[in-house]
Image (spheres, helix red, strand yellow):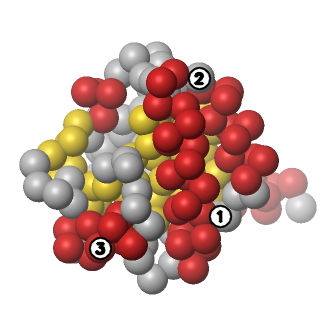
Amino acid sequence: MMKFSFSIVCAVLVLVGCASNGKQIAQVAKPAPDWTQPLSTGGTLTLSSLRGRPVYLNFFATWCPPCKDEAPYINTLQKQYASRGLQVVGIDELESAPQAESFRKQFHLVYPAVVDNGTLQAQYLINGLPVHVFIGRDGVIRKIVAGEMAHAEVLSAVRSIL
């Protein structure tokens, strides 16, 4: 049984290495890989431009029910903790800028949304939504959570990076 489990772990690591195509894979306790992505409003945003601030990346899609449920609360946190430097960034997975901007307007989001063409999906190994990434002021990833989070869990994670 132990040999079988070890073989599976090795196979997964090989697949992850092949899937990355030489790109850095995001990992907890490691610096977040830098990226430049188009904003839903035009222009671009670079993760490195947010260095020195606590960053909360929220991977979403307009068709995702949990993403819709979480958006108002995440927006409240951005407003509440902006004075402490928090920067939430919505990352729309594989949709268009108009779709991402429509989502922002629908929920009156005060934080920016970028449109991922698959680069961030590969870096963060996204295979379902939503995904939450919490990055400290030093640029190091503190926590990655796949799936919907309870408000108390999100609040705790945000406070841990402030």
**N-terminal label among 2 and 3:** 3
Q: Residue furthest right?
A: 1
Residue at mark 1: 147
- Relative to 127, is 47 on the left or the right? left
Quadrant that contains the N terminus = bottom right
Mark 1 vs mark 2, foreground winner is 2
**N-terminal label among 1 and 2:** 1
Residue at mark 2: 162
User: Residue at image x 56%, y 48%?
Assistant: 76
Residue at mark 3: 102
Q: Please state which amino acid type lies under the numbered disc 2.
A: Leu
| Relative vertical location of residue 70 with respect to residue 90 in this rendering, above or below | below
User: Residue at image x 31%, y 49%?
Assistant: 112
- Relative to 77, is 20 on the left or the right? left
Marks 2 and 3, how far apart in space? 29 Å
Tell me the SS state at disc 2: loop
